[in-house]
């Protein structure tokens, strides 16, 4: 049974049970057979529910209510769960609806869904987190993904940390990350920092804050080194200039005078004979951090192009999902804003994919219509596209004319696919930095963005 069939089956069973005559209660659900108290820290809230409903939805509840060690107390205590998250869990069990409004809410609900083994709800929460990542919450999302063994989300978080390192380090919340997260960042070969000095300063800030949390003197070198532990060995002091080191790390209580002298001598010496052994536990790497590749930004020189000398591609990162079958006409659209005036020239969309068992390769004739609308729904530009394309590729759709759009205003790109076949769907990130332009997708009403995962890139120039 597929996940869709399972959910449909569950809804049918629930509707059958509800037809037996449960009366609605004040909370909009149904009169309970028992009471539950959810408690977290000092937050306590009582809920009413049906054991049968909960047991149908979760093997954990099934064991709790009908297993050999079934819970007999009334009300039944549910510990270490945020009451609002548990309420959202009950709403999902009773109504099969999920209303995620914030990053924190998604994290809390995902924790509860994991605890009670509801994989579909876990998937919905992680999908929301995947789309809502940006520097302010990338570290916390990384720790969340690591805790719950979500490798795809972990990888996406690291991508953001590596591509927007300076913004991540400047966030006040960076001082609250776990030591393992700080160490993971310092282990990366590719980071967007101007020099290793930024990483050293961030590590020192974190160590100072950690000392305060642990009741240790924050200006004591031994305390700072104790809380940093192995993270110090990941800092590449030898990539600094003598001046950078002398005016920064050499003055820090993190390093002893002997350590500072040895590091400075190795930094300053051009002859191998003048260098001395590094103190134990320090990196001997002289390779500066590389700037990560920017998959969201590609450029194409167009000598005779009406766009000017360069066009850019804001390529949205995607989390693949099940393919979508177009049986007649398939609409897709996405709203967006951008923080500077740009010229929009077109979009990129994926071509159809072959079904399982089909031979790779081949081509077909794509048939579609694309347009760009302003916030009032007025059409700014459009195009009809009929071209033979390869299966499993990306195609660029160029509008009949380029349009200059204004910063911080809402626009909508729409594509109508008229060719029957399977198209690869996916969840796309909603915030993208592309060169000097910052795009925000899926703004406004949710109904304005439909199957937006089929619009993979905006083609533009500044």
Image (cartoon, grey):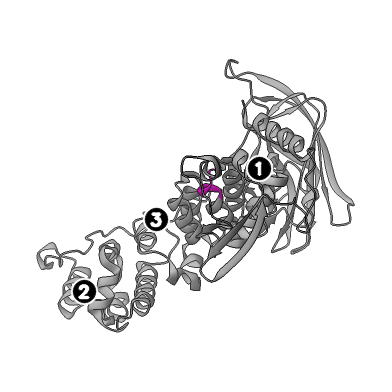
The image quarter in which residue 364 lies = top right
Measured as percent of width and height from the top left, residue 184 is found at 37, 57
Distance between mark 1 and mark 3 Cα atoms: 54 Å
Q: Is residue 176 left or right of residue 6?
A: left
Q: Which residue is mark 3?
A: 290
Distance between mark 2 and mark 1 Cα atoms: 68 Å
Q: Nearer the viewer, residue 287 or 122?
A: 122
Q: Nearer the viewer, residue 301 or 221?
A: 221
In magenta, the rendered stretch is 113-117
| Other-residue count near label 3 (Cα within 10 Å), few / some / many at <14 / 14–19 / ≥20 | some
| Other-residue count near label 1 (Cα within 10 Å), few / some / many at <14 / 14–19 / ≥20 | some
Q: Is residue 219 left or right of residue 260?
A: right
Name the magenta segment's main secondary structure. Answer: helix
The mark closer to the camera, 1 or 3, is 1
Mark 2 and mark 1 in contact? Answer it, CB < 8 Å: no
Give the mark, 1 or 3, whose residue is nearer the N terminus.
Answer: 1
Name the quadrant of the N terminus: top right
Give the mark, 2 or 1, whose residue is nearer the N terminus.
Answer: 1
Q: Is residue 331 magenta?
A: no
Measured as percent of width and height from the top left, residue 454 is found at 69, 39
Q: Is residue 115 magenta?
A: yes
Residue shown at 55% from the left, 44% from the top: 65
The label shown at residue 264 is 2
Q: Is residue 179 visible?
A: yes
Residue shown at 74% from the left, 37% from the top: 17
Q: Which residue is mark 1?
A: 53
Element on which disc 2 rests = helix
Q: Would you place residue 250 above or below residue 94 in this image?
A: below
Q: Nearer the viewer, residue 140 or 26?
A: 26
Element on which disc 1 rests = helix
């Amino acid at each position: 049974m597929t996940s869709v069939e399972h959910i449909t089956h569950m809804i049918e069973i629930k509707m059958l049970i509800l037809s037996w005559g449960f009366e609605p209660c004040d909370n909009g659900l149904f009169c309970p057979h028992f009471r539950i108290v959810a408690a977290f820290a000092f937050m306590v809230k009582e809920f009413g529910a049906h054991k049968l409903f909960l047991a149908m939805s979760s093997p954990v509840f099934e064991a709790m209510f009908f297993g050999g060690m079934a819970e007999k107390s009334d009300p039944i205590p549910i510990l270490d769960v945020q009451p609002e998250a548990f309420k959202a869990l009950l709403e999902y069990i009773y109504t099969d609806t999920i209303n995620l409004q914030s990053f924190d809410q998604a994290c809390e609900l995902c924790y509860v869904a994991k605890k009670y083994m509801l994989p579909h709800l876990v998937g919905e929460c992680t999908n929301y987190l995947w789309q809502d990542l940006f520097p302010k919450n990338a570290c916390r999302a990384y720790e969340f993904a690591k805790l719950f063994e979500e490798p795809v989300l972990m990888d996406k978080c690291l991508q953001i940390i590596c591509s927007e390192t300076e913004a991540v380090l400047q966030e006040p919340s960076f001082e609250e990350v776990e030591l393992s997260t700080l160490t993971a960042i310092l282990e990366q070969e590719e980071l967007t920092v101007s020099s290793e000095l930024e990483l050293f300063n961030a590590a020192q800030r974190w160590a100072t804050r950690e000392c305060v949390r642990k009741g240790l003197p924050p200006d004591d070198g031994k305390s700072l080194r104790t809380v940093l532990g192995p993270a110090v060995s990941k800092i590449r002091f030898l990539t600094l200039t003598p001046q950078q080191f002398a005016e920064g790390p050499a003055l820090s209580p993190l390093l002893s005078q002997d350590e500072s002298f040895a590091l400075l001598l190795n930094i300053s010496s051009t002859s191998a004979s003048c260098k001395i052994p590094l103190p134990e536990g320090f990196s001997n790497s002289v390779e500066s951090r590389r700037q990560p590749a920017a998959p969201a930004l590609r450029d194409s020189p167009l000598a005779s192009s009406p766009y000017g000398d360069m066009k850019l591609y804001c390529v949205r990162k995607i989390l693949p999902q099940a393919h979508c079958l177009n049986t007649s006409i398939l609409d897709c659209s996405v709203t967006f804003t951008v923080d500077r005036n740009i010229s929009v020239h077109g979009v990129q969309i994926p071509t159809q994919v072959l079904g399982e068992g089909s031979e790779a390769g081949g081509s077909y004739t794509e048939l579609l219509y694309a347009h760009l609308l302003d916030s009032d729904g007025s059409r700014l530009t459009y195009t009809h596209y009929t071209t033979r394309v390869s299966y499993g590729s990306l195609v660029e759709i160029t509008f009949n004319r380029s349009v200059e759009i204004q910063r911080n205003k809402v626009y909508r790109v729409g594509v109508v696919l008229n060719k029957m076949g399977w198209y690869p769907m996916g969840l796309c990130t909603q915030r993208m930095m592309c060169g000097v332009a910052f795009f925000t997708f899926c703004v406004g009403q949710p109904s304005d963005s439909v199957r937006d995962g089929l619009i993979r890139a905006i083609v533009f120039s500044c």
